[in-house]
Image (tube, helix red, strand yellow):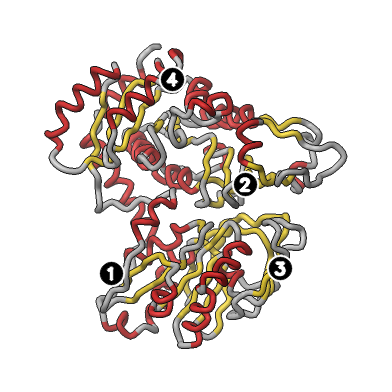
Amino acid sequence: MLAGTGSDVGKSVIAAALCRIFKQDGYHPAPFKAQNMALNSYATPEGLEIGRAQAVQAEAAGIPCNTDMNPLLLKPQSDHTSQVVLNGKPIGNRDAYDYWKKPTQALPKGGMSDTQDSLHVIKHPSLLGEELGERLDFRAEVCKAFDRLASRYNPIVMEGAGSISEINLRDTDLVNLPMARHAKADVILVGDIDRGGVFASVYGSIMLQTPEDRKLIKGIIINKFRGDMRLFDEGRRMLEDICGVPVLGVVPYYKDIHIEEEDSVSLEKKRRELADGKVNVAVVLLRHISNFTDFDTLERDPRVNLFYTNNVSDISRADIIILPGTKATLDDLLELRRNGCAQAIQRAHRDGKTVVGICGGYQMLGQTISDPDGIEGTIASLPGLGLLPIHTTMTHEKTTQQVSFQFEGQECKGYEIHQGVSDTDQSILQTDHCIGTYIHGFLDNQPVIEHLLSGIGKATAGQLAAAVNYSDFKEQQYDKLAEHVRKYVDIKAIYDILSADD
């Protein structure tokens, strides 16, 4: 298990690196994270939903992703509620306080209905069988998923969540040390030296564990180091002395390896300004933005300057404006109207700028969005931006599937994850310099990118990007990541830990 001193310390990326390293060394690894809280999700080949990070790690391991790799996914809808996705299917919305205080969920007998206090239970046909009227034990569910996965793969590269020292949540923790105990996992603690306080965070994370759990922590990895590595030699020895745990590696910060990010924290680093001589692509920064990895390929194109913004002036001056996916379409649409971004997008479209909407952004570009059953919240209906001739109704059913589609006569791929249906059977809808689609990964396809950029004069006059197969590119990045981690982490020591008798 890769556990962390906090969020965004690099657990997911180190886990992906170990998945690729174990694969390279002839093993058959698989990733596992019992519970993930993220708005970046992915559709498995079976049409079920998991956290995007585990799909990335599965790619690094060279295997298809499946829901046993992330049996419990929480998708925040507000500051207090999240949609709960269990074994790939949404089972309703939970209030955060209720969720953390009550790790099991009582399902009503005699049918599905909404309960009080923002807890929506669970109008989904997948629950109309043996689970109806019984208690849903999340801990048992995630443990069963791990056991199924461990029967097929070896080793399992587990990932914890956030900090392992949130002792107030110890009794309800499903993903960190309690999961490690069930799996009999060796735990490696990852600390982020870039944010400062690494000695206190590592030492405190270890010392706040129970004596039983402390024994599970077999090593430390210091991540995101900047500068001369020799300056930390003494610090490494001191950390081993005070913690009684070996430091297995100090991994430098890297800039030339591209691995898809899980946390929206990374978006704060992408609030760039407009650039001369490039195609300026403004991704509208929504409060509940999801699947922002949709823009990674476009962002790497040398002709493009892609940035995230909710600044009206930046939107009006951009060449292409993208409305991304969101977990709260109506709420974010209302906010766009309040902050002036909706009007700025409409003006830019009238001025001939290209506007693209993906998933929830596609719904916003239509004529109306209705939520008669309160799936998303208390907003019953809103007018859309009126750029596409569609009307959308939120429904209890959720679409999750991998898809293939034709664009400019070429075969392309992507996946759909969305609540609600629109009154069109077209997966991609185009009008005059406006495109809408439910397909995530739409912009990972080179024909789509070339179509978007071909109409921008400064793009065609500039350097053309080589059409690189995105799958091949990702394979290269996983190999580069593995090489980087091998260089700075004692992989032999990790194998020794894994093979030692406890």
- Residue 302 numbered tag: 1
Mark positioned earlier in the residue sequence (3 or 1):
1
Residue linked to disc 4: 209
Categorize mark 3 by other alpha carbons within 10 Å: few (<14), some (14-19), many (20+).
some
Q: Given the current orientation, which residue lies at the most extreme bottom position?
A: 351
Indicate the position of residue 137 as horizontal and vertical percent values. 67, 29
* Quadrant location of the N terminus in the rendered image: top left
Indicate the position of residue 114 as horizontal and vertical percent values. 78, 47
Query: Label 3, label 1: how many angstroms apart (C-alpha)?
Result: 41 Å
Categorize mark 4 by other alpha carbons within 10 Å: few (<14), some (14-19), many (20+).
some
Query: What is the three-letter code of the residue carrying label 4?
Result: Gln
- Residue 381 numbered tag: 3
Placement of 64 over or under 276, stated as above or below: above
| Nearer to us in this view, 246 or 341 | 341
Q: How many marks?
A: 4
- Mark 2 secondary-structure assignment: strand
Query: Label 3, label 4: how many angstroms apart (C-alpha)?
Result: 49 Å
- Mark 1 secondary-structure assignment: loop
Could you tell whether 388 is left or right of 128 in the image? left
Query: What is the three-letter code of the residue carrying label 3?
Result: Ser
Query: Label 1, label 2: how many angstroms apart (C-alpha)?
Result: 40 Å
Categorize mark 2 by other alpha carbons within 10 Å: few (<14), some (14-19), many (20+).
many
Q: Are marks 1 and 4 in contact (CB under 8 Å)?
A: no
- Residue 81 numbered tag: 2
The answer to whether one can see residue 104 in this image is yes
- Mark 4 secondary-structure assignment: loop
Query: Label 4, label 2: how many angstroms apart (C-alpha)?
Result: 29 Å
Query: What is the three-letter code of the residue carrying label 1?
Result: Pro
Query: Label 1, label 4: how many angstroms apart (C-alpha)?
Result: 48 Å
